[in-house]
Amino acid sequence: MTEFLVRKFIKDYENVEKVSVRTAYGVMAGIVGIFCNVLLFLAKGAAGLALGSISVIADAFNNLSDAGSSIVSLVGVKLAQKPADEEHPFGHGRIEYIAALIVAFFVVQVGFTFFKEAVGKILHPQAMTFSFVSLVVLLFSIGVKLWLRSFNLKLGKRIDSKVMSAVAADAMGDVLTTSATIVSILFFRFTEINIDGIVGLGVSLIVIWAGIGIAKDTLEPLIGEAVPSEVYRKISDFVERYDGIEGTHDLIVHNYGPGRSMASIHAEVPNDVDIETSHEVIDKIETDAKEELGIFLVIHMDPVETKDEKVLSVKAHIEEILCTVDPFISIHDFRMVEGKERINLIFDLLVPHEYNKEKQGHIVQKLEEKIHSLDTRFECVITVESGFIAKTEKAEE
């Protein structure tokens, strides 16, 4: 069904990097969500009134809030496609994240509302009846929500949409809450004990927790998150594939919305190559990155030694020492300046972001001691810096 809808209503559906195509995906997902959730609200509302069940009615209004969330996501995706202007030179892509945050607020608000009603139901229980038809309606609702979750999850991954991921998570929460409601109805049917208020309380807590989770996932790109390992590898490998590039480091990515990223990276070039030649290579990489990766990439050139055997040998020894001190640290921008009585080894030390000042200082001290033991003339000039790469990437390195 998902692929049928995609092929039927989205032109050029495979070109997901195109803003207009992403918008078409978002609009279609929003319309489908509105239709399904309004349908479920009407069906569950009728079932809840027939059963006299606060948990079913709560579930129904949760679906109505989901319809509102779909409207917000639809509007958010439409606004996010607006091109850059004088006041917003990086475009309006982050509006999609804001829309997802509003969805999270709706979810939490519904959860708190029915938390209060569930508490009231526990304190003042009301009569409840069993209806096989209403039970069928709830089972149908679970089926619809499972499909909506799969629908939004699949399309959200395809176009990298936080809003769709939020809607998918919300749909899974609805599956759990409706399942809990069915349990309370069946429990009443076979025991005549009304646990509707207790189940309603559990349902409201699940809804609140889902909303908080959605908000957390949405706030991360707005606040600024570490570079995901796959993005780090993708950009680094892209730059390093060009002739004249010896290595890369210090990658920083700024996200201005799905498919709208700006990045900077340091590229190491041979220090004996003419600067204009290296600059020409850098220009080509920046141009190609915009066309192939859809990223506005700014590259800083770092000249490095590639032929002096003495310098390369010392660097190799230091890298071996690094592995014994801490396998998760690395060096770059290595230089060796020889004097009459001392040899300065100048380099940057890259440490994981979670290392505090005390741990950094301990590593530097241990590293300096081991390097000094190689040659008493060695004096280290170390600049410690933290990376912007997610933890998974550090572990891999």
Image (cartoon, rainbow, N blue to C red):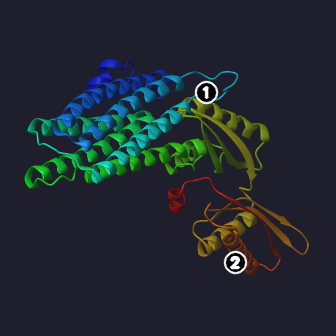
At horizontal 35% and vertical 23% (from top left) the residue drawn is 31
Which x, y percent locates residue 370?
70, 79
Which residue is more in the foreground, 275 or 205? 205
Above or below residue 312? Residue 263 is above
Left or right of 359, for residue 144: left
Left or right of 339, for residue 173: left
Which residue is more in the foreground, 64 or 96? 64
Which residue is more in the foreground, 120 or 225? 120
- In this figure, which residue is indicated by the disc labeled 2? 366
User: Closer to the N terminus: mark 2 or mark 1?
Assistant: 1
Which image quadrant is residue 309 in?
A: bottom right
Above or below residue 211? Residue 311 is below
Q: Nearer the viewer, mark 2 or mark 1?
A: 1
The answer to whether residue 24 shows anywhere in this view is yes
Which x, y percent locates residue 169?
37, 43
Which image quadrant is residue 307 in?
A: bottom right
- In this figure, which residue is indicated by the disc labeled 1? 91
